Image (cartoon, grey):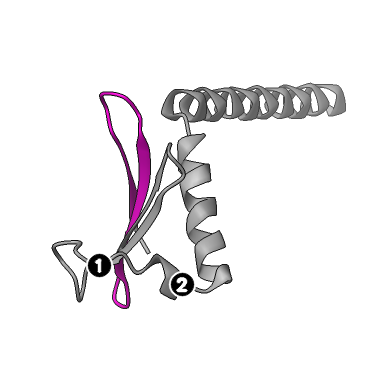
Amino acid sequence: GPFCACTNSNNNTYWCVRNINSTHNYLYCEYVTGMLTYFDLKVDPFQLRNLLYTLTDTDLNYMHRQVAKLRSYSGKKRFLERRLRKQKLQKNRLRQVKRRNKRSLSVK
């Protein structure tokens, strides 16, 4: 489902993933100190009980991968990659049109 990443904008001391969908509403955080937290916000909206140790290894690895992926995400880099890909597609289309025009001229 949809998720968001939260970072302490002042000093980047932690990273979180919050997943909210029809079956889940949780917050998973990793701190620079090595501390990890997991809160099920459906049953604990005030984040009073860290349920990290109730998670399976599979679930914990999944959440860690989400955080790692979001930590390395760059909107600027993604934008530039998409723009470059679009420019390449446009150049390829232009080449194809030129080839077709050249063939149609040589057939006549």
Q: Secondary structure at mark 2?
A: loop
Name the kind of residue labelled 1 in the image: Arg
In the image, taking residue 22 as reference, residue 90 lies left or right, namely right
Give the residue displayed 35% in from the left and 69% down from the top: 51
List x then y, in percent, for residue 86: 56, 28
- The image quadrant of residue 53 is bottom left
Give the residue displayed 19% in from the left and 70% down from the top: 44
Q: Which residue is mark 1?
A: 49
Residue 18 seen in render = yes
In the image, taking residue 75 as reference, residue 65 lies left or right, namely right
Which quadrant is home to the N terminus? bottom left
Numbered circles on residues, count:
2
Give the residue displayed 53% in from the left and 30% down from the top: 82
Q: Earlier in the sequence, mark 2 or mark 1?
A: 1
Position above or below: 16 against 27: above
- Residue 3 tag number: none
Q: Which residue is mark 2?
A: 55
Give the residue displayed 60% in from the left and 29% down from the top: 85
Residue found at the very far left of the displayed protein: 46
Magenta residues, as a range? 3-25
Which quadrant is home to the C terminus? top right
